[in-house]
Amino acid sequence: MNHNPARPVADRTAPGAARRVTARLRRTTAGTVARLAGDRNDRSGSRDTTAAPTTRRTAAARAATAVLAIALLATACSGGDGGGGGERPDQHGTEYRTGTLRVLASSELADMGPILDEAAEATGITVRPTYAGTLDAVERIASGEADKGYDAVWLSSNDYLRLRPDTARRITDETPIMTSPVALGVRPATVARLGWDPAKVTWSQLHRAVADGRLTYGMTDPKRSNSGFSALVSVASGLSGAQSALTEQDVTKAAPRLKEFFSGQKLTSGSSGWLATAYARRTDVDALVNYESVLLSAPEKLTVIRPSDGVVTADYPFTLLTSARPEAKAAADRLTAYLRSPDAQRRITATTLRRPVVAGVRPASALARDQRRELPFPGSRAVADGLLDAYDNTLRRPSRTVYVLDTSGSMGGERLDRLKSALVELTGDFRDREEVTLMPFGSSVKQDEVRTHTVDPASPKAALDAIRADSRRLSASGGTAVYSSLQEAYRFLGRAPSDSFTSIVLMTDGENTDGDPATAFDAFYRSLPAGQQRTPVFPVLFGDSDRGELDHIAGLTGGKLFDATRGSLDGAFEEIRGYQ
């Protein structure tokens, strides 16, 4: 297989992984970020993640210090199956089988399913993917955990892996399969209003339009989605004018323009799919930043702009782990040879709208043919981590979240203990300037227990300690007034509107038994001003809660349902962070 350079990374996060990385980033990049942002204090050791880690979590943290928090959503799912005798069972429930490659893959590669089925018929090699975000993949590779259950990784890029000695030494034989650059998908009416020629737009023009209030956009969270991280690197490189590996000085120079650019971000998301759905609801958002292939596949027709002064490109390298068996290496050779054959490359570009990597194969007709310079990637892990931390705590708009928490009688005992533990652990992930409101309810909102805290960049520990203390004081009593409590959360947010990423998280373990019925909430929501209707509700399925009720709330408000019945409650809360 070929050793070729790659670019960015994936789109899904393991429960707790981003939280652990956030804490490590804060400890290890405080000095770097202080220099990048200029106005931030040294925060080393200021945050206490408190929750007792498991043995595996501790080991992963030691092995993966300051891991980059770029990743998509948090589930792991399997696809495909293989034949042959099983051996070498592992904790993921996958075991080595002759003729099957166990692959840790970016979730966006799910669209390769039909092509991999064809590859299995042609080569006899079945790919069994476990979809994960790069953050999760990086931790598994760095800790050696991936060696136990996988033969290969297939992310959108290996760039960050190469910056880390503990992961770079565990991967080998990288074979790019296809490419897709980061681009902007803009509503045609907006392009016309701005008077742009899509083929000639530069990053500086995009920045100027945003700074002047003439362009707004959405993008995925750089800590949980590769497209978001690649967009962050693209903007930093494009606005800094860097001609080689992105340095701390480049980012420092671009910091004022970066802050202006991110003031135009009106939508954030942990996944490209939800971002596209939310964008379709939002007439006040002009554009999306994502991979070209994603933008061209969007339900709404968008004008795709690849800035003329350069792009960051994902090249999806199929990469063997150094621990892979010889027979797995031989299988990977057969698979990648097939995927790089002219027929397969034509099928890939036609099906996924990604670009072929083999000379002589023409891109799909929807893809522009003019070339773009590749923008430089950060030259070190410190620069990448510092850029991420600056985005979270300085550059982007702050978050404002109301946690509507069921503390009814049925939550007593183990369920309430799980809720308290999840909230305490979550404090390790709250950002600077973030406003967090805990709104417990039973038969109605428990008004005397409602607390709001804002994380002060100068002294974050005070707010985080207060949130932990309030979480530990929660007690169970009363019935379950889901809809009345949601109405109160919207009223609370409406009393003091702010320019922030605003959301409501609903956690309940049962059906609505008190207060207003669903029809009353529906009528209330539809009566809200348009601005308030843009606040989504992210319900968490837990205990005996009604999936239908919660699905309806998510659909009505433009939110997304998260299932804690199939995983941990803290994992569900962590997934939601990408949407806040």
Image (cartoon, grey):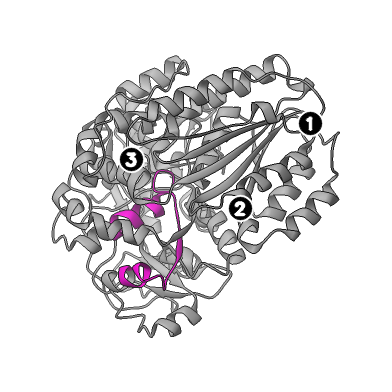
At which x and y percent is residue 567?
A: 61, 29
Question: Hey, which quadrant is residue 137 in on the image?
Answer: top left
Q: Are marks 1 and 2 in contact (CB under 8 Å)?
A: no
Q: SS class of the residue under badge 2?
A: loop
Q: Nearer the viewer, residue 147 or 517?
A: 517
| Numbered disc total | 3
Please tell me whether residue 211 belongs to the stretch shown in magenta. yes
Res. 510 mark: 1
Q: Within 10 Å of the Cα at label 3, are there few (<14), some (14-19), or many (20+) other Cα atoms?
A: many
Q: Position of residue 328 (x, y in %)?
A: 38, 37
Give the labeled residue for mark 3: 320
The amino acid type, in three-letter code, at marker 3 is Leu
Quadrant position of residue 197: bottom left
Tag in front: 2 or 3: 2
Q: Nearer the viewer, residue 75 or 186?
A: 186
Q: How far apart are marks 1 and 3 (CA)?
A: 46 Å
> Above or below — where is 153 with respect to 90?
below
The residue identified by callout 2 is 535
When the figure is inspected, residue 267 is found, relative to residue 65, above or below; the finding is: below
Instruction: Decide which of tag 2 and tag 3 comes sooner along the chain.
Output: 3
Q: Is residue 192 left or right of residue 556?
A: left
Q: Nearer the viewer, mark 1 or mark 2?
A: 2
Evaluate if marks 1 and 3 touch, with contact meaning CB atoms under 8 Å apart: no
Residue ID at (31%, 71%): 208
Gap between marks 1 and 2 measured at Cα: 23 Å
The residue under label 2 is which amino acid type?
A: Thr
The type of residue carrying mark 1 is: Gly
Q: Where is residue 364 in the image (x, y as percent from the top left)?
A: 43, 74
Q: What stretch is highlighted in magenta?
A: 207-235
Say few, some or many: other residues with alpha carbon within 10 Å of mark 1 (under 14 / 14 to 19 / 20 or more).
Answer: many
- Which class describes the residues within 10 Å of circle 2: few (<14), some (14-19), or many (20+)? some
Q: Dot 1 lies on which element? A: loop
